Amino acid sequence: MAKSTQLIDNEVFRAYATYAAIVLIKMMLMSLITAYFRITRKAFANPEDTASFGKGDSAKKFLRTDADVERVRRGHLNDLENIVPFFGIGLLYALCGPDLSTALLHFRIFTGARILHTFAYLIPLPQPGRGRSVELEHVDIFQQRHLLKYS
Amino acid sequence: MAKSTQLIDNEVFRAYATYAAIVLIKMMLMSLITAYFRITRKAFANPEDTASFGKGDSAKKFLRTDADVERVRRGHLNDLENIVPFFGIGLLYALCGPDLSTALLHFRIFTGARILHTFAYLIPLPQPGRGRSVELEHVDIFQQRHLLKYS
Amino acid sequence: MAKSTQLIDNEVFRAYATYAAIVLIKMMLMSLITAYFRITRKAFANPEDTASFGKGDSAKKFLRTDADVERVRRGHLNDLENIVPFFGIGLLYALCGPDLSTALLHFRIFTGARILHTFAYLIPLPQPGRGRSVELEHVDIFQQRHLLKYS
């Protein structure tokens, strides 16, 4: 197909696409980690999910919350809360035609900070590791916002 | 206005836009379903929401969680967790100028699996219906990621 | 860099980018408000976050939920649930080359309604203030969907 849009020929946009895909895939992995913890910890939220572990009352005891499962779920929600702004503002930023090296720096800082955050949340590392990584991301996104050339 | 961007003249992008709009609208409907269950089950999260049902202590008893409401809310969060990656990676995929029929197949599989997931969650259907639909979506998104031509 | 994409020269797209950035930044502020309430209310979700407030049992009592913290978190989740469809459908809408004044009206109504929603949720204002603002947003997004010219 010849009609490849020219957008993808733009180097900054290509860099954006790569890093956006990395963090989105990372976020999807949180679903798998949640499923893993739900199954190993036997802690489910829906009655129909417990059916394979027994019937009636014996299945009901698996309808519970587990500290590890909740931790992964909070991490997943935090991903959503931070990756959505990055995806949105990064897209607008990439479309403004910024300097390639500056853009790469921004995208890499965010991606690195987010991956660090995930490890800090899941292992868990002592604070302020996790807090610092979120701060870094926020500064990074605000910075991109600031650099939008059209404003 | 003459300045319609050329993007929308791209067939793959148009297909992407259609299916992305469908799943986003579907996600918004979850808000209405939540509101419906909150009102019929009389289970609210905020004191100000219960004001029309009574004052003082009689209103307080409506500040509770309800199994059906929580189910819809989990479904809504699950939508967010899966539609955001689809929207993001699908957008990048569409911009790479893939084959129209392949792209249509991908978008349709995801959209179908997501709608199936919603029904499986809300009715609810016995597992593994819901689990399978999520797996299908994940495979579909990973596949799109893999097909990104620039990488 | 000469390769600024032409997209950003499109007036409607520029308007979209401005308002999308505003609501995304607003959403990120919810993280800071959550952190502020968590620290002032001393209500944390993770054991490692309480480490600076004491050790052992004295720290454990900070692992609790607080009504104000939960309120901000619900507001944040609601932001996600509504800003994601706006970002997605607004983007597709902007790419269809609609009338500038109509588009500006749509983007401003959504942005205004969302900011109103945040104040109504956090102060909190009596209902139906918050409910009405969500309705307004939904109507606004459905309207944009309807106006997509390609369909």
Image: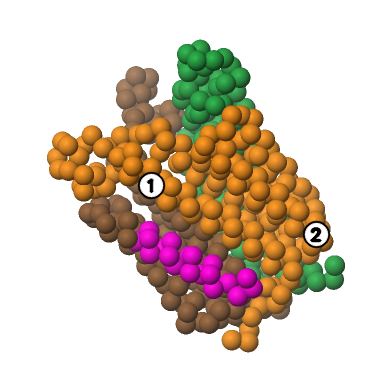
Chain colours: A orange, B brown, C green
> In terms of depth relative to the viewer, which is nearer, C34 or A46?
A46
The disc numbered 1 marks a residue on which chain? A
Relative placement, left or right, of A37 versus B142 is left
The residue furthest left is A56
Whether residue C122 can be seen here: yes
Relative placement, left or right, of B101 versus A145 is left
Q: Provide residue B113's location: percent of width, then percent of height.
A: 37, 64
Q: Is residue B144 magenta?
A: yes
Element at label 1: helix
Relative placement, left or right, of C33 versus C2 is left
Residue B151's image quarter? bottom right
Q: Provide residue C56's location: percent of width, then percent of height.
A: 50, 15
Q: In this figure, which residue is indicated by the disc labeled 1?
A: A36
Q: Is residue B45 magenta?
A: no
The residue furthest right is C1
Q: Name the residue at 45% across, 41% down.
A: A73
- Write the start and end of the magenta stretch as one range: B133-151
Whether residue C41 can be seen here: no
Q: In this figure, which residue is indicated by the disc labeled 2?
A: A101
Kind of residue sitting beneath label 2: Ser
**Residue count near mark 1 (Cα–Cα under 10 Å), binned few <14, some 14–19, many ≥20:** few
